[in-house]
Amino acid sequence: MSSVIMQQSHLTMSSCFFSLNYNVKTAMLLTVSSDVYFRRKQLVADNSFFAAPEALHLIRMRTSFCSGSSLFIKVESVQWTFDSIDDITSQGELRPLAEFLSKKQFDLVINLPMRNGGARRVSSFMTHGYRTRRLAIDYSIPLVTDVKCTKLLVEALRILGKKPPLMKTHTDCMTSRHLVKLPGFIDTHVHVRDPGATHKEDFESCSAAALAGGITLICAMPNTNPAIVDYDSLQLVKKIAKEHSRCDYALYVGASSDNVNTVHELASEAFGLKMYLNETFTTLRLNDLNIWSKHLNSWPKKAPLCVHAEGQTTAAILLLASLHNRPIHICHVARKEEILIIKAAKEKGLKVTCEVCPHHLFLSTDDVPRLGSKSEVRPLLATPEDQQALWENIQIIDCFATDHAPHSVEEKNLQTPPPGFPGLETILPLLLNAVNEGKLTLDDVINKLYRNPRRIFNLPEQHNTYVEVDMDEEWTIPTAMPYSKAKWTPFAGMKVKGAIHRVILRGEVAYVDGKVLIHPGFGQNVREWEGRKSAYSLSLDSRPSSALDRPISPLPGGITFDKYDYENDGQTNEIFSKLLLEPAPSKVHFATDKEDSRFQTNISPLPLTMPPRTRTESLSNLPQHLGEMIPTVHIHGLAGKHILSVDMFSKEQLNDLFNLAQTFRVYVSKDRPLDHILRGKIMASIFYEVSTRTSCSFAAAMQRLGGKVIYMDESSSSVKKGETLEDSVAVMAAYADVVVLRHPVPGSVLKASHHCRKPLINAGDGIGEHPSQALLDIFTIREEIGTVNGLTITLVGDLKNGRTVHSLARLLTLYNVQLKYVSPPNLKMPNHIVQFVSSKGINQEEYTSLEAVLPETDVLYMTRIQRERFDTQEEYDKACGHFIVTPQLMTRAKKKTVVLHPLPRVFEISPEFDTDPRAAYFRQAECGMFVRMALLAMVLGKC
């Protein structure tokens, strides 16, 4: 029984102690110290304070006051140790209290100090209340000293009654703001103007503007004065940036007519090479096609190369780059003709990536009258038709970049103003507003402003760096943003929804609600970071090409690649960059093609008889000469690995695999050839149990990718003669490049893997696991619903013996889901699965009725009662018929509920339900082939 004891002394100085044993183990102490005469008046008047014990009494907490307290309220009086104190300065009074506090018998102390505390006392005099508060602090017990907070606390207890609080006790604050945590963003196109034009901008102001706009890494363009075209100018700008930049940075070098033979020597220190092919604000424009060709040829293929190309120049540089077989990145795409030619180039497998600027997405020629002379920019503002083409092909665009090009207001008001807009402080709010309007998703923003720039330009991870944004804050962009020296913005007056709340850079608070807190010089040159590795990029000892072996953005028709720890939306392709593997102590070494051959590796431990096959430069023809091949490092980490359990997968690997599967799905639907990817490879299919979908889908997957399949089963092999599983697997591995194995005994696939020198894929081991089935299940959910996070997934049927649900439940712990289990009492989910899922913080509930869970279910995963797992027909019959999906039953479910089944079904789904759009199990089976295509390609190191 919870108890309350309140006391009011009749002495000149009084103390009121309030002890509350809440939920038995929790106790609180409340004291009120004051002058009796004053407090009599105030406490009697303050009825709300004495409503507190009455409220506690209502929730059945025994409330008692001392004899002195009966002057104020009629309650049961009790004797309190502190009532008969002759010497109020005596330390003896607090000894019992100190004992209580030292033994942690109170979890909370509430002490209400007297008004005018200490104003009429000598310095040596300490009240009992002060001693109480001091003891609470000394013994590290939480302390409340405000009467309003006390009343709120008691009111909260009254509302809760004896129930535990609903909020998480480890949460130290709550807010009504809709804050979202995003990665620190990267702007790959920034004109800092330092050195040479610091009245327009410098590293201090530019980096501050970047942080205010949620950008934690800027990549500075070379058209400064002097231009960054040689070693001396590069060192000069590096020194300036090191001393003055607040955020992290990297520096471009510029291509000129005079540095064709020398600029490549700076590749190890530079962010990339910038070629200006059209008129803009620079002295670096290249007019000679021969100079273009020389730079394309001399600049290392593993180093990023970016071009300013507009209109027909875009087509010209694409053609020239393809002739030189090198990747390029097209800056600030602005015209319909440009995005369409890039789209066509990606369809042909050319190694090209591109970016678009906010002013081309959110402004057009319709805004020229409003902007006047300030509208001058290169490329020019797009027409509404061009702008619409950019939005319609947003999936083709790999990056968002500001092209931050500040000029003073005075300069922009000239009759012939210089071209350029400031944009660092407005890019993220504009993109967040587009998210709120439904034009983009948050994953679009993350992909194109973080993931893709990192992968295209091989940028290292900025550890402990992120941005917090308020998605609901509505505001109007002012005439001038606070940090850029430009003091104007073309977006002035635009109403946006979404704002930057806080920016954390490498663990330091860099920006909070309008204030940049970090000092100049904190920023670092990311190209000088050594030995850093992350989930997305390898160390700077090697650098990839600036485009993909296939396009980074999806091809038409929904070909997608995504990746997230921050989860991806599937709108951009994964970058499987080709890297050099030679270690270097500090600087990047770009080897020749001949040198590359030294680093080729093979999955098999056998000696190499020839260089291994590598993936082609695009989804087109294979190289004609093995000498032209270069090795591929696969950052997904699945190449050459056994696939034995779902526990081996990370969230990023799942995204890689699902995006590749989606790409293959689109290619198959459009009848595009994929048979070059695994041409020459052989898969060994070993099934000791009967199978239709798993066996045939693996075979179809291998053959669609150009590989071949050899088969072995228990009934027609030397198993009949007594050959062991280990021997069979070892022999088949010698004939094949990858082995797919199913066996009825749990753990048998793991045992066989110790004898298999080729990648071994678990196709089911009894009642153990079925990893590839779980992969295709989640892929199907993504395809059907669009996401996995936030769903309620109900698993129904034989959960005890169903290896599919065992793997699926474990794999779903990588997502934010709720799991519900519906099964006969003797076929519940095994305890080890339940405990594993619980350890990952996933909510689980068990039910015996399917009707009870249907209204809340987003994904209904049915399984059959497996006859082969029962000893007798009688036991099997008892377990059957409890849960059957029918059209009538599904009237209780959501209209968008998805029904899955690993198949074969027996009676658990009525055939009458097959025509319902929610019946996704046959589509699920088809998805299995695409997932297994992706799995085989990644395991064999071809994607």
Image (tube, grey):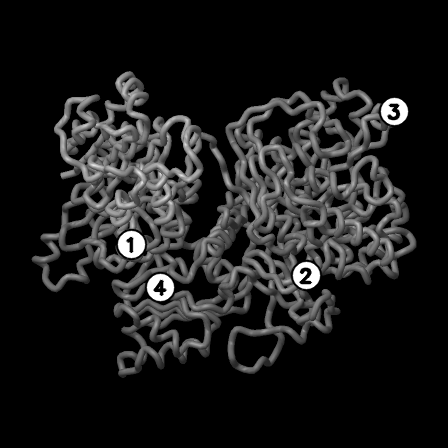
Question: Where in the figure is residue 220, as x and y percent of width and height?
Answer: 75, 46
Question: Which of the marked residues, 4 or 1, is nearer the chain's N terminus?
Answer: 4
**Which residue is the site of mark 2?**
543
Question: Where in the figure is residue 648, as x and y percent of width and height?
Answer: 41, 62
Q: Mark 3, mark 2: which one is toward the viewer?
A: 3
**Which residue is the site of mark 3?**
414
Q: Can you see residue 886?
A: no
* Residue drawn at 16 percent across, 44 percent down: 848
Q: CA distance from mark 3 to mark 1?
A: 70 Å
Q: Amino acid at mark 2?
A: Arg
Q: CA distance from mark 3 to mark 2?
A: 44 Å
Q: CA distance from mark 1 to mark 2?
A: 42 Å
Which image quarter is the N terminus in? top left
Q: Secondary structure at mark 4?
A: strand
**Which residue is the site of mark 1?**
805
Circles 4 and 1: CB atoms closer than 8 Å: no
Q: Nearer the viewer, residue 164 or 69?
A: 69
* Residue drawn at 26 percent across, 55 percent down: 834
Question: Where in the figure is residue 858, as x and y percent of width and height?
Answer: 32, 39
Q: Can you see residue 583?
A: yes
Question: Which of the marked residues, 3 or 4, is nearer the chain's N terminus?
Answer: 3
Q: Amino acid at mark 3?
A: Leu
Badge 1 crowding class, 10 Å Cα cut-off, few under 14, some 14 to 19, many 20 or more, is many
Task: Left or right? Give the position of 311 relative to 658.
Answer: right
